[in-house]
């Protein structure tokens, strides 16, 4: 995963100790992960095992980043709990569209297990008269067509001589 330090990833696995993490705060505390590592995990949708989708995880990590501002640092000293005015209500965010999830997967991991990126655009491509791979096999040679795809590897020929 891009952007996650090897040490953070190793601690995350080592400190799990056979007991799954039960939330972002448990993950932060037990694995001693910095906010930047939690952000990378959220961006890569790696917190889905905590029953939190990518958007909700990003929101939760952003909400726990840093320290409390003095206005909200008040706690009930008797029970060591935040006062009611310092607690933020849970926020339910709409799920990301499937196409955005695929884009985010490619951005953070270089691949997606959801669906092929072109599948998200298939209807739009049909509207532009783009021809699918299956349709190409049925066309006669020499015909001009519009196709769409993804560059997987860039190659340069070796200089001769």
Image (cartoon, rainbow, N blue to C red):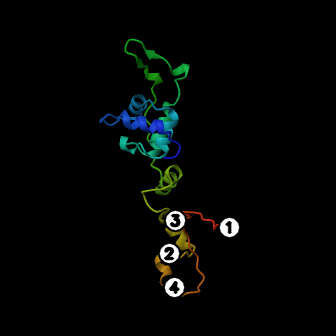
Neighbours of disc 1 within 10 Å: few (<14), some (14-19), many (20+): few
Q: Pointer 4: what residue?
A: 139
Going by the picture, which residue comes out furthest to the left?
Answer: 18
Q: Is residue 161 left or right of residue 37?
A: right
Q: CA distance from mark 2 to mark 4?
A: 11 Å
Q: Judge whether 120 appears above or below 105 on screen.
A: below
Q: CA distance from mark 1 to mark 3?
A: 37 Å
Kindly state the secondary structure of the residue where label 4 is placed. loop
Q: Pointer 3: what residue?
A: 121
Q: Are marks 1 and 2 in contact (CB under 8 Å)?
A: no
Q: CA distance from mark 4 to mark 3?
A: 22 Å
- Which of the two discs, 1 and 2, sits closer to the camera? 1
Decide which of tag 1 and tag 3 comes sooner along the chain: 3
- Which of the two discs, 2 and 3, sits closer to the camera? 2
In front of the other: 74 or 153: 153
Kindly state the secondary structure of the residue where label 2 is placed. loop
In front of the other: 110 or 42: 110
Q: Judge whether 148 appears above or below 139 on screen.
A: above
Q: Is residue 53 left or right of residue 154?
A: left
Q: Pointer 1: what residue?
A: 159
Q: CA distance from mark 2 to mark 3?
A: 12 Å
Decide which of tag 4 and tag 3 comes sooner along the chain: 3
Q: Pointer 2: what residue?
A: 132
- Which of the two discs, 4 and 3, sits closer to the camera? 4
Q: Are marks 4 and 3 in contact (CB under 8 Å)?
A: no
């Amino acid at each position: 995963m891009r952007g996650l330090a090897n040490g953070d990833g190793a601690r995350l696995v080592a400190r799990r100790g056979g007991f799954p993490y039960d939330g972002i705060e448990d993950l932060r505390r037990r694995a001693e992960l910095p906010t930047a590592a939690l952000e990378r995990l959220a961006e890569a949708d790696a917190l889905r095992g905590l029953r939190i989708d990518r958007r909700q995880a990003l929101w939760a990590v952003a909400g726990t980043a840093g320290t409390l501002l003095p206005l909200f640092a008040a706690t009930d000293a008797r029970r060591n709990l935040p006062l009611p005015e310092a607690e933020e209500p849970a926020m339910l965010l709409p799920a990301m569209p499937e196409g955005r999830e695929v884009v985010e997967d490619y951005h953070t991991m270089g691949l997606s297990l959801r669906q092929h990126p072109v599948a998200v655009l298939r209807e739009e491509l049909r509207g532009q008269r783009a021809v699918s791979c299956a349709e190409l096999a049925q066309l006669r040679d020499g015909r001009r067509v519009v196709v769409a795809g993804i560059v997987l590897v860039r190659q340069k020929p070796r200089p001769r001589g």
